[in-house]
Amino acid sequence: MSGGSLHFTAQGDIGVKKSSKQVLDTIAGLRPQLNLALGDFSYKAGIEQQFCDMVKGKLGPGFPYQVIAGNHDSDGTDGDIDTITKCLPNKLPGLQGDYGTQWYVDVPEKNPLVRLIMVSPGIPFEDGQDLDYSSGSDRLDWTTKAIDGAAAANIPWTILGMHATCLSVGRYDCPVGHEFANMLLAKKVDLVLTGHDHIYQRTHQLALGPDCPALVPDTFSPGCIADFDDTLVKTAGTVFTTTGVGGESLYDVHKDDSEAKYFAAFSGKNRSPAFGTLDVVLTADKLSARFVPADGYTFTDAFSIARQ
């Protein structure tokens, strides 16, 4: 991959349903250079190959369909991430870490525009334990070094993807842990991609500071919002998105949730329902993102972040 721009899509919670295939058709129509699959794939043990065949049939066997584990893939009960990574292997050169669990890659490999960091906080693996991303843990240290390394290398953008959420107007709370979420804010990661909640949601740009010493889940602090509009400035804060609408059944959104005021847009089963994908285009100076619904759905969202 080379040139002055990078185009990728991202979504999670996919399944092998008619709606799953509709979303894959949407991705194929957008013609991205790669896709970030944010966990929860087959939703049934033993049909992982069927899932992989579906993806390769829609996007092509050589397409970089890059995966990270979700809670339905990690312990083998509803699917096996090791099987998924074998039938949908890494296609990006220079990847560092454990593909499918915790990895990063600079894209393109030469003169990269972005460091993509994919991690698994809040995900239970075969021993029944969540991987430890708490303060002082090896995994949090690995993640912070990956973020700091991107800055040291003057890579224009840093994007982190993971399956589980922290802020949400959907079903879940903060399985990734408040320490991990606050680290992302402290490091001013440009964009955080999640799935898990089967909704679409996008926060305002959030940041720590004198009026927001820490982000506290299940509460709202107006001082944590750095910018309310859809045209944002890099280094001012972090945008969190959830695109858990890759094909599996949708969840309701709750506009009266204590965290709702953090969000600029959301969609769910009970409010502008839509399956679809996040669509992102990067240049050295601008990140442009939009939600693209699958055929038959109308909900959309768009925002941008510019370097100054």
Image (cartoon, rainbow, N blue to C red):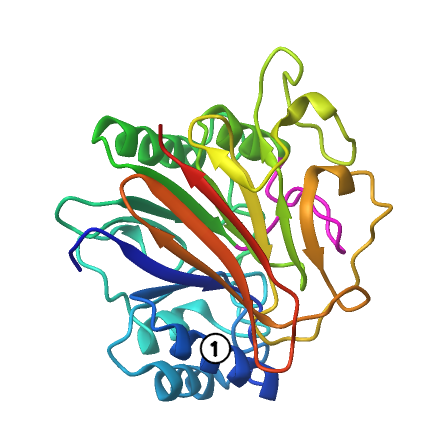
Task: Judge left or right: residue 221 versus residue 15.
Answer: right
Identify whether 26 is placed above or below 194. below
In the rendered image, residue 166 lying in the magenta stretch gets the answer: yes
Whole-percent x and y of residue 151?
29, 29
- Estimate how packed mark 1 is, as few (under 14), some (14 to 19) or many (20 or more) residues with alpha carbons within 10 Å: some
Q: 252 or 265, which is in the foreground?
A: 265
Whole-percent x and y of residue 178?
63, 32
Whole-percent x and y of residue 250?
71, 70
- Does the rendering let one see residue 119? no
Task: Judge left or right: residue 26 versus residue 221.
Answer: left
Extent of the magenta region:
163-177
Q: Quadrant of the N terminus?
A: bottom left
Residue at (36% x, 42% y) in the render: 286
Determine which residue is flagged by label 1.
26
Identify whether 39 is placed above or below 285. below
In the rendered image, residue 138 lying in the magenta stretch gets the answer: no
Q: What's the residue type where badge 1 is placed?
A: Thr
Whole-percent x and y of residue 249?
69, 75
Q: Please, what secondary structure does the residue beneath circle 1 have?
A: helix
Identify whether 298 is placed above or below 147. below
Q: 155 or 45, which is in the foreground?
A: 155
- Does the rendering let one see residue 80? yes
Residue at (65% x, 76% y) in the render: 297
Name the quadrant containing residue 18: bottom right
Q: Quadrant of the C terminus?
A: top left
Q: 278 or 163, which is in the foreground?
A: 278
